[in-house]
Image (spheres, helix red, strand yellow):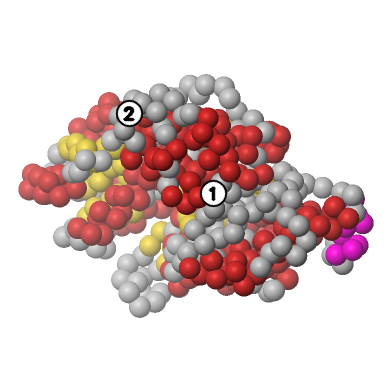
């Protein structure tokens, strides 16, 4: 269960917020003075803090400084009844997660608290790799001993301590966020903020403001200054997920920040300096987006100082038993179900499935089976129906050695449409590439130079395509 600390000197505010925000997944603790709040931060280690700026014993800004000194990664949300207060603005500059005006809008508050608690978990729960037992039992583990995953671990180890940008490539569900967190956890910046932004989840019109902030009056609805994530994360790390979905105009501003560490808020003239490490990720082929004019080539090379390619689950099926064991232990604890074994027939069904959603889909399937199961054995009939059928809903099963001409593009496209996919273009092209490259490489007996000549593309393009498909683990030259 997560814990939220609320610091406010008005008893009615504390009572109201505690009553409205407390839930089965969120515990509430309260303090009426700054000193009480600071002591609770030290004693209880809450996941997030709501902090009023006007307290009887200390200013909110001084309290914020002491809280951040104790834990720079703790998300602090400033609440104030004074819309023009410079204290709240200054706290945001120093790294506060957000500030909200009283009277508080409950849906907005719940959304901000939810994001703050999620961010707290990302930055404070270690992501570990390899088979060694983590010192922190709550750590999230990247599981696998296959050759492709060994290359991923080596790449994380090589780049984590270096102050360079990293680009993580791989299909949806392969664990790109976990890799980003592992890099952060093992970096010299691991005591500073870690902020994660999903570029595809934020409307294009708002993403620039979210990243760089805006001045009051910069656009309709900008009724107050907003401090952006790059300013908040100074000396820390920002994870830009799905960066391939970022608008070209925002890409230009990111490029300038990478070049000289400076930017302006939307609608502002003040030049702001920041020291931020960027870890970016995408499931798209950025080289293809560059060729189509949808992604800046100069930004692509700035981000790809070091690239890590995550293989899809179907390319490392020898890791599946370990993944199943890991998720089974996890859900046995989380769901309080003493399931003690996964029989061979269940594993065989899991191995026969293609896992287009990769590790994320496997995790969901195991959790579904745990919820359905009775007894101590995870029998095959508890698995989702599509897994038991051996194919994803509406999507033809991939085979490791597809015969020439076996792909029916119309059938694949219709299957994806029936499954309500919003990524039809990329998935169809990825499937065509997979079969085409397999056939050409087989004809060229694995010689990539000859294969690239037969395809009429550069060897670098071929290697990037293979990496994106998970046929090589790391695309470094």
Q: Residues within 10 Å of mark 2 (few under 14, many from 20)?
A: few
Q: Where residue 71 sits in the image (x, y, percent)?
A: 39, 34
The residue pinned by badge 1 equals: 390
Q: Where residue 149 sits in the image (x, y, percent)?
A: 66, 36
**Mark 2 or 1, nearer chain start:** 2
Is 451 in the magenta? yes
Give the left or right position of residue 86, taking residue 132 as reference.
left
Q: For this rendering, which residue is in front, 238 or 92?
A: 238
The residue pinned by badge 2 equals: 375
Which image quadrant: the N terminus?
Answer: top left
Q: Where residue 247 sits in the image (x, y, percent)?
A: 56, 70
Disc 2 element: loop
Label 2 to label 1, Cα distance in Å? 24 Å
Give above or below for 106 relative to 343. below
SS majority, magenta: helix
Write down the region rendered in magenta: 447-455
Q: For this rendering, which residue is in front, 177 or 160?
A: 177
| Residue in view at x 60 percent, y 66 percent | 412
Give above or below for 322 relative to 277. above
Q: Where residue 224 sits in the image (x, y, percent)?
A: 32, 67
Res. 438 image quadrant: bottom right
Is 209 in the magenta? no
Give above or below for 310 relative to 284. above
Disc 1 element: loop
Q: Residues within 10 Å of mark 1 (few under 14, many from 20)?
A: some
| Residue in view at x 82 percent, y 47 percent | 477
Res. 51 image quadrant: top left
Q: Is residue 239 visible?
A: no
């Amino acid at each position: 269960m997560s814990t939220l600390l609320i610091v406010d000197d008005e008893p009615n505010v504390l009572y109201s917020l505690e009553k409205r925000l407390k839930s089965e997944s969120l515990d509430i603790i309260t303090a009426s003075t700054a000193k009480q709040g600071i002591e609770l931060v030290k004693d209880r280690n809450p996941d997030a803090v709501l902090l009023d700026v006007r307290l009887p014993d200390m200013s909110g800004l001084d309290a914020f400084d002491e809280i951040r000194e104790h834990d720079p990664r703790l998300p602090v949300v400033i609440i104030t009844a004074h819309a023009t207060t410079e204290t709240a603005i200054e706290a945001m500059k120093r790294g506060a997660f957000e500030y909200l005006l009283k009277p508080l809008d409950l849906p907005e508050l719940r959304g901000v608290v939810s994001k703050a608690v999620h961010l707290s978990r990302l930055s404070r729960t270690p992501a570990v790799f390899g088979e060694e037992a983590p010192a922190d039992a709550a750590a999230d583990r990247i599981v696998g001993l296959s050759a492709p995953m060994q290359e991923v671990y080596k790449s994380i180890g090589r780049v984590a301590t270096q102050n360079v940008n990293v680009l993580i490539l791989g299909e949806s569900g392969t664990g790109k966020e976990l890799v980003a967190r592992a890099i952060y956890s093992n970096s010299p910046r691991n005591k500073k903020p870690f902020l994660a932004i999903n570029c595809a989840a934020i409307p294009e019109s708002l993403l620039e403001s979210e990243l760089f902030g805006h001045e009051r009056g910069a656009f309709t609805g900008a009724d107050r200054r907003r401090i952006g994530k790059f300013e908040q994360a100074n000396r820390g790390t920002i994870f830009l997920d799905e960066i391939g979905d970022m608008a070209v105009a925002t890409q230009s501003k990111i490029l300038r920040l990478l070049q000289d560490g400076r930017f302006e808020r939307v609608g502002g003239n003040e030049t702001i300096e920041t020291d931020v490490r960027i870890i970016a990720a995408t499931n798209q082929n950025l080289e293809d987006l560059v060729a189509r004019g949808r992604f800046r080539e100069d930004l692509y090379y700035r981000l790809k100082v070091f690239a890590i390619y995550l293989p899809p689950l179907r390319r490392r099926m020898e890791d599946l038993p370990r993944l199943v064991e890991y998720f089974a232990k996890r859900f046995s604890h989380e769901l309080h179900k003493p399931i003690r074994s996964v029989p061979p027939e269940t594993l065989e069904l899991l191995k026969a499935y293609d896992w287009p959603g990769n590790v994320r889909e496997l995790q969901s399937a195991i959790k579904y089976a745990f919820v359905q199961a009775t007894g101590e054995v995870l029998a095959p009939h508890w698995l989702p129906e599509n897994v038991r059928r051996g194919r994803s809903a509406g999507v033809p099963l991939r085979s490791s050695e597809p015969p020439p001409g076996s792909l029916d593009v119309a059938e694949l496209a219709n299957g994806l449409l029936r499954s309500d996919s919003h990524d039809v273009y990329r998935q169809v092209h990825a499937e065509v590439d997979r079969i085409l490259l397999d056939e050409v490489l087989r004809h060229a007996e694995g010689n990539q130079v000859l294969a690239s000549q037969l395809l009429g593309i550069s060897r670098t393009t071929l290697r990037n395509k293979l990496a994106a498909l998970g046929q090589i683990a790391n695309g470094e030259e």
